[in-house]
Image (cartoon, rainbow, N blue to C red):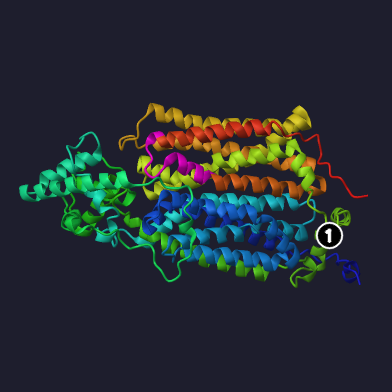
Amino acid sequence: MTDEATVTPPQDSESPTIVRHAILTVLTLMSVLLYLDRFAVNIASEFIREDLQMTQTQMSWFISAFFWSYALCQVPAGWLSDRLGGRAMMTLYIIAWSIFTGLMGAASAVWVVLWLRVFCGAAQAGAYPTSASLIRQWYPISKRGMASSLVGLGGRFGAVLAPLMTAWLILYFVGDSSASKLAPTDVLDPVALLARFDGPPDTATPRDKFISGYLAQLPETERSQLLDHAALAAAQLKQQEQKAKPTPLLELADWVPRFGVNDVPEIREIPSQFREAVDAFAARVSDANLIDFTAVPVRLPANAQRLLVRRQQQNDLSEAESTLLNRSALEVLFPKEIRKYQGRGWRPTIILYGFIGIGVALVLFVVARNHPESHPWCNQAELEVINDEPTRWAKSREPGNPTFPWRAFLTSLSLWGNSLTQFFTNIGWLFVVTSLPRYLDNVHSVPLVTKGVMTAFPSGLGILGLFAGGRATDWAFHVFGLKSGRRIPLVASRFVAAGGYGLCLIVSALFAPTPENWWLPWLYIVGLCIASMSVDFGSPAIWAYAQDVGGRYTASILGWGNMWGNLGAAVAPLVYNMVLGENPTVGDWNNVFLMCCGVFVLSGFCAMLLDSTKPLTVERAS
């Protein structure tokens, strides 16, 4: 018996239920979670690196690993959903990546977090293909575009929410002063810390102004001992640098499982000859007069800045408050040598995200079904809305089991232009969502919450670019025709994105990063907002191109291009690391800006190859 025979016409008084909208709401919530879990680790990346004592090369693979598996698992994950059902597989995917995300918060070895990121990428790869499958079952053909756009918008919102929510939660779990005491485990590199005190200080920098003031406070005997230790530490550090070997791009040993072995020590061993000097330095952190803030300008977090204002108003601070103020300042003055006390909040934050994801998965399992006909909450009136006449006609014309058109894809110059456009685009764009927090921390010493706000701005304005790009793409089609109407918005958006990074280079040439120039990072954010908005402005043209030339292979073209885009995202962190190295200078960061500017130009030239007037030609067996 057919489905039509089992469905009786609805009564005039019966209103359609809204089960389809409930499912769409949960899918949108899933999309928010998808990007929240994906990008939360970026705002916490320096905390993770310090905690696990990772090199920058290891950190670049930590970010890159996700996108390799995400790109390569999209087709298999979509196939599993088609075969086993969207409801079960979406639930499984959400639970899987949530468990892997939560486990990162408990990891104590580098190889563990690397593989967890691989598994996260593989699990998230099935999210959007499965979501599209459920939308196809639950929405009529005339409403699928809007439903899909809402799910996509959820992901953009998640990208905005990730740095803001993660920064706030990290602070919430740490508190104001409970963890601010400087313990031996908080000295990341004791030798490098002592070596900073060697030689005549250059009083132009805030750090050396502090060192001069600190030495002046010490009794003669203690000062002499510290300088002796500093000279010895500087000589030892120089020997270490001379013996150091170049870091390989890929160290296979980082990926080898070592079960039952904690290969990340809690503290870098303090040489016995330096232990007394390090302990004495740490003990003075609670001294209210440790730092003369009138002579040593430091950009402090908001909570420490409030304490400084109180002290400047002649209000006495408690010992815990003085410790927090001094510790916050020392973390800015010695960013590579002293662990950030706020970093202790990243683990409970990531674990919390894992539990939230499991909750979302359970809600989806309860609300969703693979087909409207099998849902107990869906009445006959809603079935008629979902399976209207155009939808039934479209389903009747769908091929039973289309094969992937490999030959046509590999021989189409236009499709290669589309693929390379997305590949180069993501190399330039990924800086905004992955490396921007590190840049703001390293170069401008931006506090955590402010860093979260700054990182959220480009993604937030990208949403506006997405809406504007859709309207502009339709306008360009009516004005310039199909071929140029698709090319112009895409090409222009890539060149404008290159201009956004060019603006960053101009700002860097005009202004030096100093604590007094507190406004300077916002100028860089303006340039990166231009780049991010431009990328999203061109996205509708890519989608429209796939629909123009794809026919029944539209989904395949979108998946193929998305794979190449994510391969670009996988390559990007490794390329950034090659340019930056372990200890980047301002010039190194400018080289990254220059590289991102260049790849967007390449992306624009590749977009010139797109031709929507030439549909995909697939040879069919006779």
**Crowding near pointer 1: few (<14 within 10 Å), some, many (20+)?**
some
Q: Position of residue 422 (x, y in %)?
A: 64, 41
Number of callouts? 1
Q: Position of residue 502 (x, y in %)?
A: 50, 29
User: Viewer-proximal residue, 290 or 606?
Assistant: 606
Question: Which residue in the protein does label 1 denote?
Answer: 387
Q: Quadrant of the N terminus?
A: bottom right
Q: Is residue 198 above or below residue 382?
A: above
Please give the range of residues in magenta: 572-587
Location of residue 34 (image quadrant): bottom right
Q: Is residue 362 visible?
A: yes
Magenta run includes residue 584: yes
Going by the image, does 223 lie left or right of 590? left
Q: Is residue 474 above or below residue 374?
A: above
Location of residue 32 (image quadrant): bottom right
Q: Position of residue 297 (x, y in %)?
A: 25, 40
Identify residue type, mark 1: Asn
Residue at far right of view: 622
Q: Is residue 443 above or below residue 185?
A: above
Magenta run includes residue 451: no
Q: Residue at x 45, y 52 (%)?
A: 58
Q: Residue at x 67, y 66 (%)?
A: 89
User: Viewer-proximal residue, 264 or 498?
Assistant: 264
Going by the image, does 580 lie left or right of 568? left
Q: Is residue 306 visible?
A: no
Q: Is residue 305 above or below residue 85?
A: above
Q: Position of residue 233 (x, y in %)?
A: 21, 48
